[in-house]
Image (cartoon, helix red, strand yellow):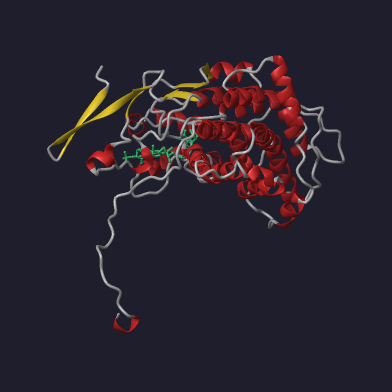
């Protein structure tokens, strides 16, 4: 295969190098396009544009393949622990037992947040959205550890920030919930593993002896693993661009949290449940809502359906759907919302509109069903997504910085007014 692509512009032909990845993905390297032709490319939403090369996650939208550092998501979700997968994506290899023990110990020792940060939580208005709290609390961590603001410091300093982030996000998430309930916060306990500790901080009360349910802990572990990374999605691309200015890791992750909040991205898991509840409230007329989703005049979209890359099934949705059945059965939960979700999925998958556009359930379609069953409030669903995605954001930020990538600064095509002179207000 030719190593270059030939482009003829205004009678001049230029050759552009072809890049081929380890899974035979192909790209045209246009780094010299503007310099040689004065032209840039234009690609709204970057649907055809790669911003980088990465060794972290491989996905194939047509075949429904997802692998972290080469390991299939199906195996990791079934066999691994979340922190093991976090270590894998961040460091490139599965940890040995000693490496894993040291990693877990480092994280366990950083689960507390500075007591002064409780004042922030106290100051938020009742009903403050936990994603707004998470983004600002994560960015605020950089002010409590000012040495982290120089992101060029030692690798040891960088690892300390990585451990602090992984350790403190569950505490921030659980404490924002306790504050929203006006309940006393529950401090992390070193005797618990990552998921059990989060459940303990979320659900235990001073008035009872709470024991984390192993069924819930297992489901949480699987959900977090399924969200760990997903190549250059909206929030990960945001983390990389913010980090490319050499902004510190806390600030870059906070930017990722804000990008994830959008209902077209990570906010979809909250929007799915709200949509299913609306359909139920509306009498369960699924055909009506499917018609709304297909109507170009109607802004309604089927939340949890469709994906930029998966034009076939999202492998994560397949695993989560199975897990939803298992968790609800194990917990003896009969959720009418799940029945509506399954009916909606069946009808949509047989509808030409969805089939023609490759619209299938994505990771967000069923995850909310499980979060609901284990007692996570709907507004915290996207925070759960952020907790799962945190290792992926860290890994991608680290890869971008270690590769010395340039500051992200896209070009544009100007479509505004041509030059004109200022007019005094008296003459306007
Ligand atoms: C995540 O990128 C990632 O990897 C993201 C993610 C991750 O792990 O990081 O996987 C997590 O964000 C999953 C997606 C969650 N979002 C939703 O569930 C919201 C609903 N989905 C849509 O908004 C949409 O499908 C997107 C945003 C997910 C993808 O949109 P694209 O790729 O920009 O596609 P598009 O908007 O151009 O849609 C193509 C066509 C359009 O119709 P036509 O103009 O061709 O007639 O499909 C239609 C769209 O109107 N369409 C839908 C639809 N999604 C797309 N129609 C009805 N309902 C939908 N959900």
From this view, report whether residue 413 is shown above or below residue 339.
below
Which residue appears at 36% of the width and 33% of the height? 354
Which residue appears at 67% of the width and 30% of the height? 333
Which residue appears at 74% of the width and 38% of the height? 202
Q: Quadrant of ligand 1?
A: top left
From this view, report whether residue 57 is shown above or below residue 235.
above
Image quadrant where residue 270 sits: top right
Instruction: Quadrant for the C terminus, please.
Output: bottom left
From this view, report whether residue 338 is shown above or below residue 254.
above
Q: Nearer the viewer, residue 54 or 189?
A: 54
Looking at the picture, how far across and down is residue 246, in whole percent?
A: 54, 43
Looking at the picture, how far across and down is residue 375, in whole percent?
A: 69, 37
Q: Nearer the viewer, residue 237 or 175?
A: 237
- Left or right: residue 251 versus residue 45 is right
- Left or right: residue 238 versus residue 191 is left
Looking at the picture, how far across and down is residue 201, in whole percent?
A: 77, 38
């Amino acid at each position: 295969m030719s190593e270059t692509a030939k482009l003829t512009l205004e009678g001049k032909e230029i050759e552009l190098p072809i890049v081929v990845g380890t899974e035979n993905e192909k790209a045209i390297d246009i780094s010299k396009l503007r310099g040689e032709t004065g032209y840039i490319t234009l690609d709204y939403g970057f649907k055809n544009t790669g911003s980088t090369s990465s060794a972290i996650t491989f996905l194939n939208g047509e075949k429904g393949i997802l692998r972290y550092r080469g390991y299939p998501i199906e195996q990791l979700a079934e066999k691994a622990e979340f922190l093991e997968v976090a270590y894998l994506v961040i460091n490139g290899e599965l940890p040995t037992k000693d490496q894993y023990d040291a990693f877990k110990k480092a994280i366990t020792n950083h689960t507390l947040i500075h007591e002064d940060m409780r004042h922030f939580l106290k100051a938020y208005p009742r009903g403050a959205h936990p994603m707004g709290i998470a983004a600002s609390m994560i960015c605020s961590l950089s002010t409590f550890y000012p040495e982290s603001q120089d992101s060029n410091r030692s690798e040891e300093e960088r690892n300390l920030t990585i451990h602090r982030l992984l350790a403190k996000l569950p505490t921030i998430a659980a404490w924002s919930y306790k504050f929203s309930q006006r309940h006393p916060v529950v401090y992390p306990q070193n005797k618990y593993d990552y998921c059990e500790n989060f459940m303990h901080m979320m659900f235990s009360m001073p008035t009872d002896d709470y024991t984390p349910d192993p069924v819930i802990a297992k489901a949480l572990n699987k959900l977090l693993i399924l969200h760990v990374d997903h190549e250059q999605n909206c929030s990960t691309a945001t983390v990389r661009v913010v980090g490319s200015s050499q902004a510190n890791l806390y600030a870059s992750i906070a930017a990722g949290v804000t990008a994830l909040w959008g209902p077209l991205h990570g906010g979809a898991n909250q929007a799915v449940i709200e949509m299913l509840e609306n359909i139920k409230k509306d009498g369960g007329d699924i055909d009506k809502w499917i018609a709304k989703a297909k109507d170009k005049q109607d802004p309604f979209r089927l939340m949890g359906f469709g994906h930029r890359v998966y034009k076939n099934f999202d492998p994560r949705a397949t695993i989560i759907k199975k897990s939803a059945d298992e968790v609800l059965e194990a917990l003896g939960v009969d959720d009418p919302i799940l029945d509506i979700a399954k009916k909606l999925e069946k009808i949509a998958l047989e509808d030409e509109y969805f089939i023609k556009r490759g619209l299938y359930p994505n990771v967000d379609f069923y995850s909310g069903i499980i979060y609901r069953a284990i007692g996570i409030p709907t507004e915290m669903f996207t925070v759960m997504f952020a907790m799962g995605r945190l290792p992926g954001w860290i890994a991608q930020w680290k890869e971008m910085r270690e590769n010395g990538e340039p500051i992200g600064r896209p070009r544009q095509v100007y479509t505004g007014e041509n030059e004109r002179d200022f007019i005094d207000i008296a003459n306007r």
